[in-house]
Amino acid sequence: MAITKIYKGTNDVTSSFLKAYKGSSEIFSQMSLKRLVLVGGLSDHSTVMTSDDGGITWVERTTPLTTGINGVAYSPNLNLYVAVGRDGKIITSPDAITWTQRTSGVTTSLYSVVWANNKFVACGAPGGTKLYNLYSTNGTTWTKTELYGGTAPHLYSVRWLNGQFIAVGGWSTGGGSAVFTSTNGSSWSKILYDSQNTSVLKDYTFADITFNGLVYVAVLRGNPITSPNMGMVAYSSNLSSWTIAKTGLTYPMAINYLNGFYYVTGGTTTGYVIYSSDLNTWTTKTLSSCQYPRPIIFENNKFFVPGYPGIINYSENGTTWTYKNTGKTTEFTDIIAGQEL
């Protein structure tokens, strides 16, 4: 039985919380060209590349960092890019070409950053027995907020979904997942599924989360000790009670809801994209020569999925994929569309 039905007409309505509406204003075509910004790196270098022609050609940019970048965000209000990475490093740029390092106030790795509600919010690994998030209204000065004390979880992704910041992750040893929510980026509520909980998520770690307008859909990886490469898709209307939609995924990394479909990327030595319109029937596509693929976006009339080693996968329809090898021996970790050109 299908979980979601996508309505494509302009007058279709539904009362079911799992049905998603796709209005006539949602189309694949996009009118304006935006600068694409690709980030990554490894333990001994950082990588930033930009494209101004829709992903056809890429230009490497210099950064002040000597370790990898994990996430990047863009503020159209400030016309500012912020990238976060290992060892608490943060860099900013007005154009994604010239970068300046900022002081974060933490020394643990930052995994993800988002711009929403007039501020940047970043999350990452715990330091000692405390977990912090960071927020900034200008990208230059950052404030940290303690989210959790004790043996704290890692937060691998932060998104702005349904009018709130949602940070998801879990414990790096022993399993257990975690969700934190905030409307302002400074005061947070926590919903935990640790190893003592009876939730179906207690042996899993959140990797990423999205929202279709009615329900939250997340990808989770298995227990880091016993089953690190097994994952699943689950959905929830309230972030508290979850239902499993699909199991048996190998190391899922990211999820996004685009053009009426849920897209999941993942894999280790061989990458993949799986997609579904209803969370019930899934189609799998292999990403040639790509390992550990990361977020999927749809910009400039194309889907893009970055990965290792220096691979950018792209598709015009989400089903037929080709790839470009940038020649960089690096792990691409995030990609965004920034300023209009």
Image (cartoon, rainbow, N blue to C red):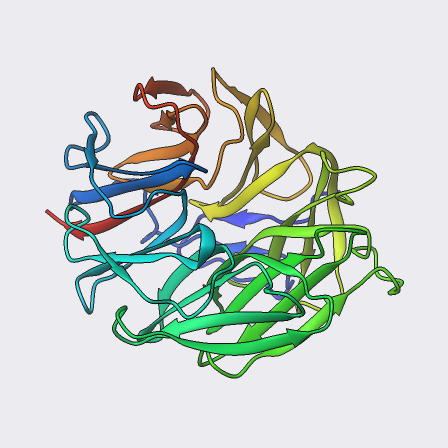
Say left or right for 15 vs 315: right
The residue that appears at 24% across and 45% down in the rendered structure is: 63
The residue that appears at 43% across and 23% down in the rendered structure is: 309
Residue 188 % position (x, y):
57, 79
Identify the image quadrant of the N terminus.
top right
In the image shown, does 30 or 201 lie closer to the viewer? 201
Residue 336 % position (x, y):
32, 47
> Relative to 183, is 37 above or below?
above
Say left or right for 21 vs 200: left
The residue that appears at 48% across and 65% down in the rendered structure is: 161
Q: How many marks?
A: 0
Q: Tell me which corner region of the image, top left, top right, bottom left or bottom right, holds residue 168.
A: bottom right
> Relative to 48, is 316 above or below?
above
Say left or right for 328 vs 285: left
In the image shown, does 110 or 22 lie closer to the viewer? 110
Q: Could you tell me if residue 7 is visible in this image? A: yes
In the image shown, does 341 or 280 lie closer to the viewer? 341
> Relative to 183, is 4 above or below?
above
Say left or right for 101 vs 253: left
Residue 300 % position (x, y):
24, 39
Residue 294 % position (x, y):
48, 38
